[in-house]
Image (tube, rainbow, N blue to C red):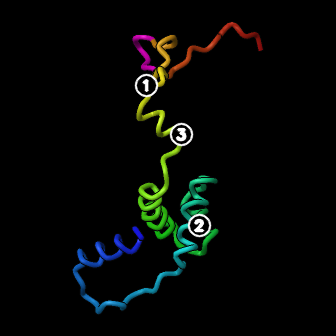
Amino acid sequence: MQYKKLQVEIESKKIRINQKGGGWKPKLEIKEEVCLCLFSLRKMPTFEILGLHFGISKTEAKDTFHYWLEILGNVLPASLLEQVEKHDTDYGIPTHNRRYETKSFPGRVFLLNTSLDL
């Protein structure tokens, strides 16, 4: 399991002041941490709201999210969108809309129709 490998790697790099097993105990179980990450990916709340929902601080919510995001990103298959973005030339999908580009504005800036009477 990649989680255990990552934990062993983190433990090997630590410079210990306290004995192993000392300090604060985790507030969330592993399954709750994974749920926090998946919930954040699905609903995209702020870390403050995420922390309130799971009963932890916003800093701990941010750290937990990014920790599990790395693990889940390596374990789970990439989404179809990520696959297309990596190989966009294979599918003939343009990365920028050249029709709306101007010299003063980079791509993805759209010109507005100013002739509307409101």
**CA gap, disc 2 and disc 1:** 35 Å
Q: What residue sits right under mark 3 in the picture?
A: 80
Of the two numbered discs 3 and 2 in the rendering, the one whose residue sits closer to the viewer: 3
Q: What residue sits right under mark 1 in the picture?
A: 90
Q: Amino acid at mark 3?
A: Leu
Label 2: how many Cα within 10 Å (few below 14, some 14–19, many 20+): some
Image check: 48 left or right of 106?
Answer: right
Q: Mark 3 or mark 2: which comes first in sequence?
A: 2
**CA gap, disc 3 and disc 1:** 14 Å
Label 1: how many Cα within 10 Å (few below 14, some 14–19, many 20+): few
Question: Farthest residue toward the top?
Answer: 115
Mark 2 falls on what kind of element?
helix
Mark 3 falls on what kind of element?
helix
| Residue 105 is covered by the magenta coloring | yes
Residue at 47% x, 38% y is 83
Query: Vertical placement of 7 versus 46: above or below?
Result: below
Q: Mark 3 or mark 1: which comes first in sequence?
A: 3
Query: Vertical placement of 54 versus 85: above or below?
Result: below
**Front residue of this view, candidates 41 and 54:** 41
Q: What residue sits right under mark 2 in the picture?
A: 35
- Locate the N terminus and report the quarter of the image it occupies: bottom left
Q: Position of residue 46 (x, y in %)?
A: 57, 56
Q: Amino acid at mark 2?
A: Cys
Magenta span: predominant SS is loop
Q: Amino acid at mark 1?
A: Asp
Q: Position of residue 69 (x, y in %)?
A: 46, 59
**CA gap, disc 3 and disc 2:** 22 Å
Q: Position of residue 85 (x, y in %)?
A: 45, 33
Query: Vertical placement of 29 versus 90: above or below?
Result: below
